Amino acid sequence: MLDSLLDSTERETDLVWLSVLTFLPILCAAGLMVIPGRFKEWMRWWSLLGACATLTVAACTLIDYHRLLDSHSDRTTRSLYHPANRLDHRADQAAYDAAQAVPKPFSSFNMFTRRAWNERFDINYSLGVDGVSLALILLTALVTLCALVASWKIDQQLRGYLAMILILESGVIGAFLAVDLFLFYVFYELMLFPMYFLIGIWGGGRRKYAAVKFVIYTLFGSVCLLAAIITLYSVDVRDFVPKPAGDLRTEEVHTFDSVTLSRVGRAVMLVLSGQEERIGVQTVAHGQLVPTMPDDTNATVPLLAPGADREAAIARLKAATICTPTFQYILFALLFVGFAVKVPIFPLHSWLPDAHVEAPTPVSMILAGVLLKLGGYGLFRFAFPLAPWAASELCWYVGLIGAISIVYGAIVAMGQTDFKKLLAYSSVSHMGYVVLGLATWSAGARAEYWEMGVDGAIFQMLAHGITASALFFVVGMVYERAHHRDLNRLGGLMEPMPAFGGASAILFFASLGLPGLCGFVGEFLVILSAWNFSYALAIPAILTTVLTAAYLLWTWQRVYFGTNPDTAQFAEMTPRESSVLLTFAALAVALGVLPGFLIFQWMEPSIQGWVDALVRVRG
């Protein structure tokens, strides 16, 4: 891999910059090792500089990605959407170019890179960007930067603390960029140990219990995920990977490439739904794969690699174990459970309140703002595309799980007196909307409602990342002054801290879904999609918005209103605290007022392509 970065004949701009985006935080963590221990301020500023640099690279990546969308789009038809810009098409084109008798030069402008890592097992260092992953990477970089600012007063084993946060950031960004399943699993597991140490060393009185519980639940999900990955690797994909012209090899081919495996999954769905005649072969024109995305959902779907023998390929697929309902159900169950632990959803959520209560404030910000999003992202990127038949068959039940989580989280949150526990259960409720939005799978003329639901689910992850991170920071500020989190003992904060109260009000109202703020957009789209999918799932989600408003307004009243002599002398926000809280408050307003301009114009094309690909095979 290092040779590819240094060799001018193999150098690829995308390889360099996506690698820099992924590993820059780890490099900054390594830089901490050479700073003498007595220079703690240097360590803080060095870490902050690394987080700022990572956010800058992510912003530059967004600019490049926007140029990529512009290069093919026809703004008069479907905004920036064009099939050639889809991540799976760019990955397929790169595989086709590499498979030629004389491999074509690597492209430096497709926001995708692939290099062999372990050729024996076809493990690749494969990174790619689309609108969804890039939005979550920007969220990760921003929340990490704010968490480091919030960590300024932490003094215990500072070097290790800062290094753990930076390593955690690299793991998250790598997981959002990874296209190869094995590489994704490596990054996914890389996040486990920094979070374990951050809770177990710098947490509260029950930190060891909370850290072990976090690891046990996460490892349970990881085992399910690993079993699914190994199962997928056993699938023969020889008819789905391009080969040089004249290559007549007949041996089996196995891969961890999620793009190839997603085409296998869609082909299986066509077979199991009695539409095998629609399976087609990818076509090539002028050395380029032809991206086809007709509006006719009954048209041929080009899933087999160029030059594949269609009849023989379908016969092999139908005889394979993967092409059975049992295999598909098991595969989807493993993927769903593996990612549901991270969302988390009921009943796999109980690790979250303990982790939040014991974790230091900056770690709670990262946990709520970033790590929970990996669960929703995994469902979007892997669970649904890799086992679409089972996902389609079980989508109502998946939506039911999401609806139960929405209601359960809100009801339990109402009974909490610990400020942090209330926000933890609130996260369970809010992330339930993500699962519900992804599950509202409709086809034909109603497919637009599913796209609306997926739009809402992804936007909800971004909005929750902002509001949850900010509210946990609010709790941390209160705890620094009051030295407790008991809601019944707080009150009257608006008098000594009016600026703090004003900024907090924006974030409370954003979290409860007030129109004009970020929390409204995602929930509204998910509820609208669910209403057109199933009244039984939509009605609980709608009614829970009332519960959410009730417990958040009640919390706001108990913390900020009234007169309390115990809080009358609390100090107003410091400039450091203001920089974090006002940044989140400004984003909550901006994303609520201009969601299309700031997010949807460059994120929605990826969701449009994702929905189109799956709707077409459902018929």
Image (tube, rainbow, N blue to C red):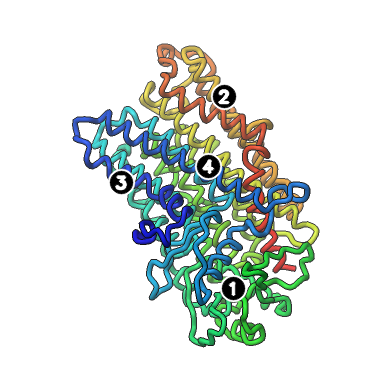
Mark toward the viewer: 2 or 1: 1
Q: Which residue is mark 4?
A: 427
Give the alpha-carbon distance from disc 2 to disc 4, as whole Å: 18 Å
Q: Residue at x 42, y 25 (%)?
A: 477
Sequence-first tag of 2 and 4: 4
Mark toward the viewer: 4 or 1: 1
Q: Which residue is mark 2?
A: 505
Question: Residue 618, percent across and down?
Answer: 71, 68
Question: Residue 9, percent across and down?
Answer: 42, 62
In the displayed structure, would residue 229 be above or below residue 161?
below
Task: Locate residue 242 relative to residue 539 in the image: left or right.
Answer: left
Q: Which residue is mark 1?
A: 264
Label 1: how many Cα within 10 Å (few below 14, some 14–19, many 20+) = many
Label 3: how many Cα within 10 Å (few below 14, some 14–19, many 20+) = some
Sequence-first tag of 1 and 3: 3
Amino acid type, mark 4: Ser
